[in-house]
Amino acid sequence: SGVLECVFALGHPAADVSVSKGQQTLRGSRVQVQKNGEVRVTLDAVKLADAAVYTCIAVNASGRAETSCRVTVMEKPSLKTEPRLQALQSLRAGSTLSLVAEVRGLPLPQLTWQCNDTSLVSSGRESVTEDLMAETGSGTAVLTLQRLAAEDRGTYTLKAVNDVGEASLSFQVKVKDVPQAPAVFQIERSAGERVQVSWQPPQFDGGAAITN
């Protein structure tokens, strides 16, 4: 909530006092005019729609006086996406990843994308786009990554920061590809034409359990 205050010398005869928001005259309990000329405008549960120029006007037979102030509403960033995108995404190598988030915040937040704590920018296979409207403090952020490879798997995070606060949203991505070659391949024993060998599982299993 917020309170706007101004004080007039009401003059003689006592001036009539009114308050306007833009071109609209405010009425009701949110506007209080005291006998001493003090004017109070109460903004309960402040909303983005409360942002405007507020003007206090005093008028009597001798003339008119007024004073104005501009109210700017600030909103902490918030991020939201579809439930299906927040679930673990399993994509084949060579396909395209597209992550979309709804963004809110005033002033408009600064947005950054990261993959496993490494910043992402528009270049080559990566495309980062934003469509934000200053009037409503809302819009969308999109990350597109083409020709997915095994090294693209991991946690993708969108961060939004403005003067009021910050927010983050994470996506888990798995990339399915052919597994790497087995590690530490060695001959355990040999007897005649028979050889027994052993190896360690590969560091990357291709995004699925190795069955053979």
Image (cartoon, rainbow, N blue to C red):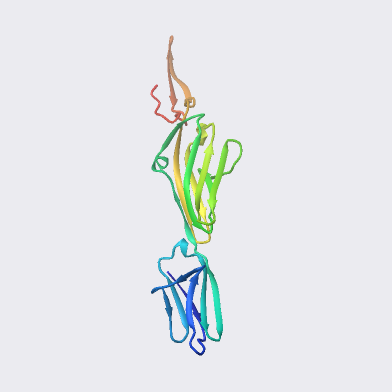
Task: Examine the rendered structure and indicate whether residue 85 appears above or below residue 64.
Answer: above
Instruction: Name the residue located 45 percent from the left edge and 48 percent from the top edge.
Output: 169
Residue 124: x %, y % from top left = 61, 36
The one nearer the camera, 131 or 119, is: 131
Image location of residue 34, percent across then percent down = 43, 83
Q: Residue at x 43, y 31 (%)?
A: 207
- 123 or 186, nearer to the observer: 123
Residue 127 occupies quadrant: top right
What's the residue at 48%, 87% (across, down)? Answer: 14
Count the marks: how many? 0
Quarter placement of the N terminus: bottom left
Q: Nearer the viewer, residue 155 or 91?
A: 91
In this view, the residue farthest toward the front is: 61
Q: Is residue 197 above or below residue 145?
A: above
Q: Residue furthest bottom?
A: 12
Q: Residue furthest right?
A: 123
Q: Residue at x 38, y 23 (%)?
A: 211
Q: Is residue 48 above or below residue 100?
A: below
For the residue pair 13 and 177, the one nearer the viewer reads as 13
- Look at the image and tell me in which quarter the C terminus lies: top left
In this view, 193 is above or below 171: above
